[in-house]
Every structure is written in C-alpha cells, then in structure tokens.
Amino acid sequence: MTALLAAARRASGLSQAEVARRAGTSRPTVSAYEHGHRNPTLDTVERLLAVNGQQLALVPVPLFEQRSDRRGKPFFVPDQLPRLLASAAMGTIVLPPNVDWSSPGTPRAMADRRQRILAYQALLAEGEPEDITRFVDGALLVDAWNDLYLPAPIRSAWQPLIDRAIAGVEA
C-alpha cells in the first residue's frame, strides 16, 4: 500500500504537504503512510488517492485453462476476457519470441486494426496466459473476432467468451 500511495502522489505531481492539506491530515502522517511506518485504513487510502486524482478499482484476474488442438498442441483460454488500459491496448508492442517466432522483435502498432488482428491471431494460438493478459484487450478482441483467422479448436474454445460479451453478460 505504501508504494501505491507514493506512486499516486508522484503521478499527480503534488507534494506530501499539498496532499496532506487536501486530505485534511498532516505531512508527517502522509510521509509515514508512504514509508510504511503507519498503516492507513481503507477509507484513508481512498481519500489520499482521491486527492491525487486516483481511485481504487477491482480488476478481475482471468483464470486460464489449458486446452489442446487436434494435434495435441496446447493453447490457453481464460474464464473471462482480459481488459487493458487504453494506453496498453493501443500502444506499440513487441510480442515475445514464443508468440511471434516468424518475425521476432517486430514492433506492432496495436492502434492499427490490421496489426492488432495479426497480433491477436498469434497470441490466441501461441501465447501463454501472461502474454494474453498483457497484450489482448477483450473489447478489441470482440471487435476483431469475425476477422481473425484461427484454427477451429481455438475459435470454438474462445467463442463462448465472445458470445457472453456480445450479449452483455459478464463472466
């Protein structure tokens, strides 16, 4: 929690004194929270984050199941679609070699739908759970779904997630 509070304050550009003034506490108290010398309550954390323009959010963590295609090659399917911050979902990425073995080290501009489709095809077919959660955004995957070329076992394994998202039903 200490690193979170310090990171939020640094991101806002505020001093400890200004955070303390806005939150109705003292600068030494803010410092003690940031350095782990005191433990704030959840209400206090929320108040300190709010004065820094931040908030706590619960983010579901997908759980993955390993499946195999017709030849026995493994692939992974989450229990829910992963979500990314817009900056991560639309940024330029370099896929790991286990995913992009045909052109390793090639930057992919995820804001370009064609490049995103190619990256998603590789990620769903070759990616480990860490790769999928790091690079695949569920909403963008749903948007690209009909244009992705995927082996039938992978498409059918992911289809229920896509159907739930289109129907507006959360996992």
Image: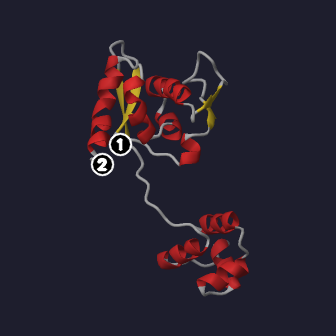
Q: Is residue 19 left or right of residue 146?
A: right
In the image, 116 versus 60, the foreground residue is: 116
The residue under label 2 is: 170
Q: Is residue 43 left or right of residue 52?
A: left
Determine the CA span between mark 1 and mark 2.
8 Å
- Residue 40 spot, x, y in % from top left: 55, 78
- For marks 1 and 2, give the one nearer the viewer: 2
- Residue 108 spot, x, y in % from top left: 61, 29
- Circle 1/circle 2 CB separation < 8 Å: yes
Relative to 146, say whether 12 is above or below. below
- Residue 16 spot, x, y in % from top left: 71, 77
Name the residue: 39% across, 20% down.
150
**Splitting the image into 4 quarters, where does residue 98 fall?**
top right
Packing grade of label 1 (10 A; few <14, some 14-19, many >=20) is many
Say what amino acid the circle numbered 1 marks: Gln
Name the residue: 51% across, 73% down.
46
Say what amino acid the circle numbered 2 marks: Glu
The residue under label 1 is: 80
- Per the image, label 1 sits on a secondary structure element best described as loop
Name the residue: 63% across, 66% down.
8
Packing grade of label 2 (10 A; few <14, some 14-19, many >=20) is few
Q: Earlier in the sequence, mark 1 or mark 2?
A: 1
